């Protein structure tokens, strides 16, 4: 009897963890026009192989009445053209839990983006 309770509890925890892992996802948006900014030393072996990727991992704070947040991309040394080629937004379990605990006021954001190559014209 005691062994079956332990088995049921372990199996329930396993199913719950599988359901929670399904809440992690990524969305990638890519332009078909223009060329990406190339990576100087080729170090990446993932989807972004050969691309100069800029990664943001931060917590944003928005009011409870606000429905959106705008991230401004300016011309910098990392992104001289200020035009975007590829954007990836990643949502994780930790981000969902932080948003739930703070009633949506704080959100953990993981963004990767690649700038377009600057036009010589």
Image (cartoon, rainbow, N blue to C red):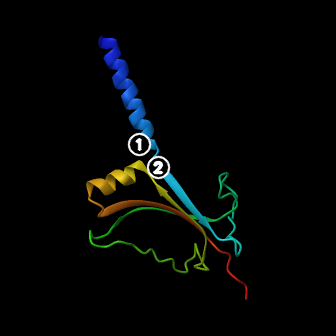
| Residue at point 45%, 74% (across, down) | 71
Mark identifier at residue 24: 2
Coordinates of residue 63 in the picture (x, y in percent): 28, 70
Coordinates of residue 90 in the picture (x, y in percent): 49, 57
Task: Say whether residue 35 is left or right of residue 71.
Answer: right
Q: Secondary structure at mark 2?
A: loop
| Crowd around label 2: few <14 · some 14–19 · many ≥20 (10 Å) | some
Q: Secondary structure at mark 1?
A: helix
Whether label 1 touches label 2, CB < 8 Å: no
Coordinates of residue 115 in the picture (x, y in percent): 61, 72
The residue identified by callout 1 is 20
Where residue 65 sits, quadrant-wise, is bottom left
Coordinates of residue 4 in the picture (x, y in percent): 34, 15
Task: Say whether residue 21 is left or right of residue 77.
Answer: left
| Residue at point 37%, 24% (across, down) | 10
| Residue at point 36%, 61% (across, down) | 107
Task: Say whether residue 105 is left or right of residue 84.
Answer: left
**Front position in the image: 36 or 68:** 68
């Amino acid at each position: 009897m005691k062994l079956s309770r332990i088995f049921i509890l372990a199996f329930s925890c396993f199913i719950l963890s599988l359901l929670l892992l399904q809440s992690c996802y990524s969305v990638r948006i890519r332009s078909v026009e223009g060329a990406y900014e190339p990576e100087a030393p080729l170090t990446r072996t993932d989807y972004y192989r050969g691309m100069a990727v800029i990664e943001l991992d931060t917590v944003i704070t928005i009011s409870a009445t606000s429905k959106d947040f705008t991230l401004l991309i300016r011309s910098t040394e990392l992104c001289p053209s200020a035009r975007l080629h590829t954007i990836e937004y990643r949502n994780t379990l930790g981000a969902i839990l932080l948003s739930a605990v703070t009633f949506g006021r704080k959100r953990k954001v993981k963004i990767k983006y690649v700038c377009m190559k600057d036009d010589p014209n």
